[in-house]
Image: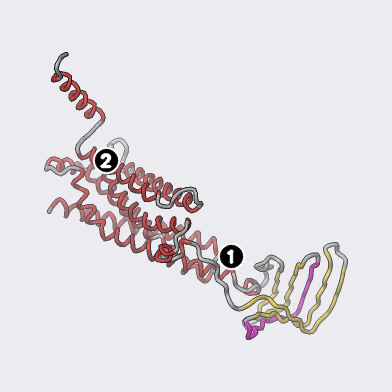
Amino acid sequence: MLFQSSIRRELSRSFGATVVILVTIVVTIMLIRTLGQASKGSVNPSEVSLVLAYTIMGNLSILLALSLFIACVGTLSRIYRDSEMVVWLSCGQGIGSFFKPMIGFAFPTLVLIAGLSLFVWPWSNQKIQELVDRFEKRGDLERVTPGQFQESANGQRVFFIDKASTVKGQGNNVFIATKEGDKQTMTTALHGHIENKQTGEKFLILNNGQQLIYSNTGETLKLSEFQEYGAQIGKTDLNIGQPVPRALDTLFLVLNPSAQNSSELVFRIGLVFTSFNLIVISLALASVNPRAGKSAPLMLALFTFIAYFNLVNIGKNYSEAGKASPFMMLIFHFFILLLAATWLTARHKNWSFFNLRAHFSGFSKKITRNSPEL
């Protein structure tokens, strides 16, 4: 049919262009954010590209939902602006007739959003958490950069290496400041290297140095020189922290219900309902005011999307804190769908407050006129 084919063809062009633009903007924003995390020491600088790729893959479902919503609003606004809507209305195609071709076009995207939110979202978050945990739990000397003071993971040691050796795990002119209770230790050495034991423990071996131990009052307790000195600095094995709910598999969330797990599960399922509701909302919002400009419908669509997702995130936070049932968000999505469907039906049948008022007024007069007199 000419009507459906023309709508789908224009939706595909608008959707493709919107996805490219949004992905470019989001990649730039995420790159700046990831580089900021790397500069603060939260992410390994050599793994910035991996973190960026996983972040984009995890948020791709939200990008597709926003792109689909903007494509629908932009297409319908263009039809209104170029007076094509008058032609379709005169042919008997109301605003509700656009629902079938738009859903037919959006169905593959909705299936893709469901797959991304249920499977790719937790997988990408799990990979990001593993990279961050691995970088945070690295050894103390692995944090050290030659020429810079670096604090250990527990905050009780400060390391400084004047010059790194060409051999990995060795350095020259080593300085270590350690605080243990009311005592502080200053250790300096000309050379230092790391030895890994078979038990997985790591030892720092210092050569040709001095050690000064004193109390917090400044009174010197011990001053000694050594040819070789060893200190345990950690273990080789990494203990990855407990994964957060957003990094857990969907099947695990289903089999292990809790306040946080159920909230995360409802949030993932709700992304599909959100995408579907936004299509219905786009039909209800479809109109153009010549005095408002071409960008007014897109700005309204953007604010609608932001408000919708903010409400979803607020509901998720409340349910995770145990202040509300996680399944209340499904009721919220159903309420939004009912409200948008009512609004769309009113526009399709050309209902208005004055028309309904006149209709009920005439209906009441008819009843009064036909009622028998007492």
Quarter of the figure that contains the C terminus: top left
Residue 112 point in image, percent of width and height: 31, 62
Mark 1 falls on what kind of element? loop
Which numbered disc, 1 or 2, marks the residue closer to the eye? Answer: 2
Mark 1 neighbour density, 10 Å: few (under 14) some (14–19) many (20 or more): some
Q: In this orientation, does residue 347 appear? A: yes
Mark 2 falls on what kind of element? helix
Q: Does the residue at mark 1 contact the one at mark 2 (Cβ under 8 Å)?
A: no
Identify residue for label 2: 342
Q: Is residue 54 above or below residue 107?
A: below
Query: Disc 1 marks which amino acid?
Result: Gly
Specify whether residue 196 is painted magenta. Answer: yes
Q: Residue at x 26, y 56 (%)?
A: 106
- The scheme the figure's colours follow is secondary structure
C-alpha gap between disc 1 and disc 2? 52 Å
Residue 243 point in image, percent of width and height: 51, 65
Of callouts 1 and 2, which one flags the residue occurring earlier in the amino acid sequence? 1
Is 361 in front, or is 130? 361
Q: Residue furthest top?
A: 374
Query: Disc 2 marks which amino acid?
Result: Thr
Q: Quadrant of residue 236?
A: bottom right
Identify residue for label 1: 41
**324 on left or right of 218:** left
Is 136 in front, or is 339? 339
**Magenta stretch: dominant secondary structure:** strand
Where does the magenta region start and end? Answer: 183-199
Specify whether residue 124 is painted magenta. Answer: no
Q: Residue furthest bottom?
A: 198
Residue 108 point in image, percent of width and height: 26, 61
Residue 109 point in image, percent of width and height: 29, 59
Q: In this orientation, does residue 57 appear? A: no
Q: Residue furthest front?
A: 374
